[in-house]
Amino acid sequence: MKVKSAIALLACLSSVPSVCIFLAIGSIAAAQAPSRDSWSDENGTLRAKAVIGDCLNGLSASQSAGICVPRAFEACEDEHGTSQRQMNDCATFSRLAWEGRRVDAAKRLMAARSSGVRFPSPEPHIKHLVESEGRWEAWNRSDCEMQAAFSEGGTYHRYDLDICLSNHAANRAIELERLIDVWQKIFVL
C-alpha cells in the first residue's frame, strides 16, 4: 500500500507539483485527525437517550421493553470502546439516560389532572406514587451499593455501580411509562 502511494505521489509530482503537495498534506492531516466519537462527554447521554428511544419505538407488539435495558450501554461499548475508562463512561451515559427517562415519566404522572369522568381526583394516586418513588430511590442506591461493594476501591467500581443503577432506572422507567398508558385513560396527563 505504501509503495502504491509513493508511486502515485511521484506520478502526480511530475505533472502538477503544487496540487500534489496540497493533496498529500491534506491526506496526512486527515489520517492524523482523530475520528469524532459520538459518545464523547458532551454527547454521551444524548446519544444514549437516542438509542433507548429508537429501541423502545421500534418494538413490535410481541417484544418486551426489557430488551432495551442494555441497548445504550451495548451501543456505546461497540462505538466508544471497551477499555475500563470507556466502559465506565458507557455505564454512566446509560444510567443518566435511563434516570432522565424515569424522572420525566414520574413528573408526567405527578402532573395528572382530573378528567371529570370516573376518578374525579388523581391526588390519592399521586400521593401513592410520591411514596413509592421515595421508597424506590432509597432501595435503588442501597441495593446497588451492596451489589458493587466487592469492587469498591478499584477501577471497576464506577462501572459496577453505574450499570446497576442504570438497570434499576431502566426497569423503573419502563414501569412508570406503562403506568402512563393506564393513567391517560383516566386522567389528563
Image (cartoon, grey):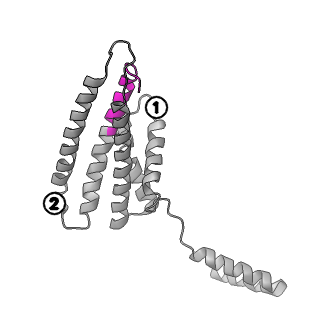
Measured Cα–Cα span from mark 2 to mark 1? 39 Å
Q: Which mark, residue 101?
A: none
Let me know if residue 184 is in the magenta part: yes
Instruction: Using a 10 Å C-alpha cutoff, classify the residue at mark 2 as few (fewer than 14 neighbours), some (14 to 19) or many (20 or more).
Output: few
The answer, for residue 8, to whether it is visible in the render is no
In this view of the protein, which residue sits in the foreground, 38 or 23? 38
Q: Is mark 1 on a helix, strand or loop?
A: loop
Let me know if residue 20 is in the magenta part: no
Magenta span of residues = 173-189
Q: What element carries label 2?
A: helix
Answer above or below: position of 61 versus 72. Answer: above
Return the residue at label 2: 150
Coordinates of residue 171 in the picture (x, y in percent): 30, 39
Answer above or below: position of 115 versus 77. Answer: above
Return the residue at label 1: 60
The answer, for residue 120, to whether it is visible in the render is yes
Residue at 39% over, 26% down: 181
Residue at 24% over, 37% down: 133
Q: Quadrant of residue 33?
A: bottom right
Q: Quadrant of the C terminus?
A: top left
In this view of the protein, which residue sits in the foreground, 88 or 125? 125
Residue at 48% over, 42% down: 54
Coordinates of residue 77 in the picture (x, y in percent): 40, 58
Main SS, magenta residues: helix
Give the residue type that dot 1 points to: Ser
Left or right: residue 59 compared with residue 29: left
Q: Say which label, 2 or 1, has the lower sequence index.
A: 1
Left or right: residue 26 compared with residue 19: left
Left or right: residue 39 compared with residue 26: left
